[in-house]
Image (cartoon, rainbow, N blue to C red):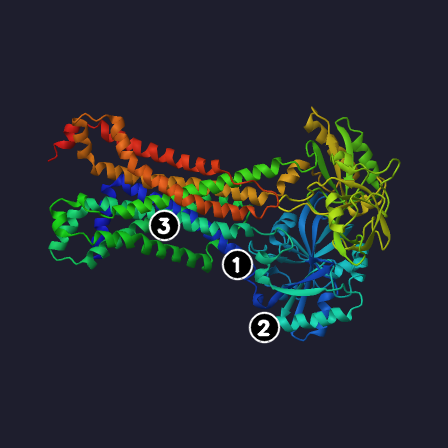
Amino acid sequence: MIKNYLKIAWRNLIRQRLYSLINISGLAVGLAVCMLIMLYVAHEHSYDRFHKNGNRIYTLHATIKMGSQALNMAYLSYGTGPAIKQNQPRVEDYMRTMDYRQVIVSNPETSNAKFADKKLLFADAGFFKFFSFRLASGSPSDALKKPFSVVLSREMARKYFGDSDPIGKTLTIKTDSAFTYQVTGVVENAPSNSSIDFNFIASASTLTSMKSFARRIDEQQGIGPGSFNVYLLLKDQKDTAEVKSVMQVMVKADKNAFDDEKFSLLPLASTHLENNFGDLTNVKYLKIFPVVAILVLLLALVNYMSLSTARATLRAKEIGIRKVTGASRTNIARQFYVESALFALISFVLGYFLCYAFKPLFLNTLKLNIDNSFLYSPLVLMLMAGLLIITILVAGSYPSMVLSSFNPVITLKGKMSKQSGGVTVRKVFTTLQFAISVGLIICGIVIDRQLYYMRHADTGINKENVLMIPVGVAFDGHYAAFSREMKNLAGVSEIATSHYGMFQSYDMYSVSGKNPKEQMMLPSLTVDQNFVNVLGLKWKYPPAPNTTLEGHNKVVINEEAIAQLHLDPNPVGTYIKAGGDNLQNPIGMYMKPGNDDVQIVGVLKDFNFSSMEQSIKPLGLFTAPDTAKFWGKYSCNLFARIKPKINLPTLLEAMKGIYKKYNSDTPFTYTFLDDAFNAQYQAEDRLASIFSIFTVITIILATMGLFGLAAFTIEQRAKEIGVRKVLGASIGSINGLLSKDFLKLVLLSIVVASPIAWYMVHNWLQGFAYRINIQWWMFAGAGLLAIVVAVVIVSYHAIRAALVNPVKSLRSE
């Protein structure tokens, strides 16, 4: 019986090629979109679940309250892990890691070539027992036991040693200074769903042999903030409350601990999505994309069911004959379910190939990497199987119910076209399809306008023609000479220096205003005296004549700092108390105020030194001289304002030559300041790009549904059109008559979609401190586009039908 059903289904598929193509391709596109989003969401939620003891591993964080501000500390001291294990028997083990952003690596045995690589991770000796990263060679217990031992990822082992065995060989790795490391193991590349990433894993005991790190470790023997990621392996995952309570007791007993210092334990598997200490994930998408996936799949299924019921009414006599000859409604429903299952299976296979083909583009747009092995993991295979089952169940449900309910007497009399035949439901389907499309178009317009607004709003900074060049610690005492040579280039008008790149980071200092008891953490930048002019910052209250800005006890603040510190309207010349705690840079800063009074020497107008998603924060600028050893010792960024109409490639080549003169090992890199500003909105850019693609897909699906439905409806009214032509009706009047019913549905879809879309984009815009107003034309534009699409599709079929010779359409009976 099933074989017979499949044979009938295949014959109908071949006989009705156009509608079969529309049905299968429409459903396949919807399934492909759903698969891509499902793959992305599953990958994001699978982070760190491959570790054997993952359910008992927790990341440790601290929160410090300074006045009314609560500061989250992602990194803890070197002594925190051992101290907790010693005082809390419920902690089975601890692990400390520290990331080093960029290193210079070379293999002295093969060549003198040096490479700039990233992802050097210092870790305790038990790293490979604590976590489940698989060693391809080497001993898990001994690989990181000795100082200056390093384990390479398989990719790095191949890069530096080719196909030869690297165990026992050496690499020169330059951090602050160059050291020789012995290779003690090769580890498989970190999975794409691992929050711990690495190219090189070096023994943490190495740090005590480095002068710069040794001092840092000596200062971090107590429990509290520091430079290390600290992980705890608990004996039971139910012990988190007890462990936290013991840590709070330890903090109270530590004289050097911060006031109101509190610890929190976050499960390792939740770190990727719940970590609030950086933009490490695409969390913004996880709430939006699943909704879009459901809408696109729903639209595709509605499209499929609408066309299936519309075309299958042509088989009404077949259904009538089968019922007369004894077929039950259950048998007929089963037949159409089998047919729908065949169509759904073909669509699923086609959708999978589309998913596989467009996966690189999708992942590249999201700036995401997913291992191929994850595509065939049990989790993904189960999700794919579930999607197929849901598709078959939903796709076959409505057609089987509607078509099996036909009255055999009416169908055999040929009066099927006068029955409702699900016409009302198909109108609901069409309205739903266009409502989804209109809603997504509105959302896309708002997202695009918000991004445009953020990029073109006045931020208070002159970002045009400013080049930002990162300068590492390798320059040491040569930074002053380097900056002078850069300034002397013909294409450079001015230069300035800042410890951090603009829009990238800042320090935090504890200060108090009028009330000494009210402390706050003041975001601060260490800059030189040219910084204000080069970036085009505007003075609210400029420094007094002949006042120097340089000095550890002088600060320039912005307008927001006046409000937050409750200072006088013009506080120039007054003092604030600086506590001297720099919580983001524990190595110490040149401009460390100590516990001195700091004089306010100027006030700048507010400017956006971070993303416009956030309101402007208070800010303090501490000025160091150009010649300060600080710039070369702790790294900095050189800002060069480029003169107009300069041959940029030639200038960049000259800059590269000067850079290599003082640092031949590190690659010369640069960023234009406006690009650095725009880079803050990469998440929104990716959202806009993906949203645009999804919107186009929904429009295509809605168009396909309307195309098929309009063709069928007008085909059913062929005799009516013939009669009207015989009576003198024009092509325009016939087109208007046939288009009217469909336009009513589209207008209804606009009415339904508009308030829902407004609610969604209104909530999305609340995440931006500076945002656009939602305007009426955004809804009108989306509605007009939907109307134009509907008119074009319906008019195409209506004009074709109106051009047919009425004699041909009327002579069939």
Residue positioned 22% across, 51% down in the render: 403
Seen as rendered, the residue at the extreme bottom is 89
Question: Do the CB atoms of the residues marked 1 and 3 lie less than 8 Å apart?
Answer: no
Q: Nearer the viewer, residue 429 or 563?
A: 563
Image side of residue 25 versus residue 455, left or right: left
Q: Quadrant of residue 257?
A: bottom right
- Residue 174 in view (yes/no): no
The amino acid marked with disc number 1 is Ser
Name the spot of residue 413 as percent of width and height, x first.
11, 46
The amino acid marked with disc number 3 is Phe
Tell me the residue that label 2 is attached to. 238
Name the spot of residue 3 as percent of width and height, x first.
22, 55
640 shown above or below 158:
above
Tell me the residue that label 3 is attached to. 348
Image side of residue 586 versus residue 811, left or right: right
Indicate the secondary structure of the residue bearing disc 3.
helix
Q: Nearer the viewer, residue 89 or 148?
A: 89
Name the spot of residue 217 as percent of width and height, x first.
78, 60
The amino acid marked with disc number 2 is Lys
Q: Nearer the viewer, residue 744 or 710?
A: 744
Q: Which sits earlier in the primary sequence, circle 1 or circle 3?
A: 1
Indicate the secondary structure of the residue bearing disc 2.
helix
Tell me the residue that label 1 is attached to. 46
Residue positioned 43% across, 50% down in the render: 293
10 Å crowding of disc 1: few (<14), some (14-19), many (20+): some
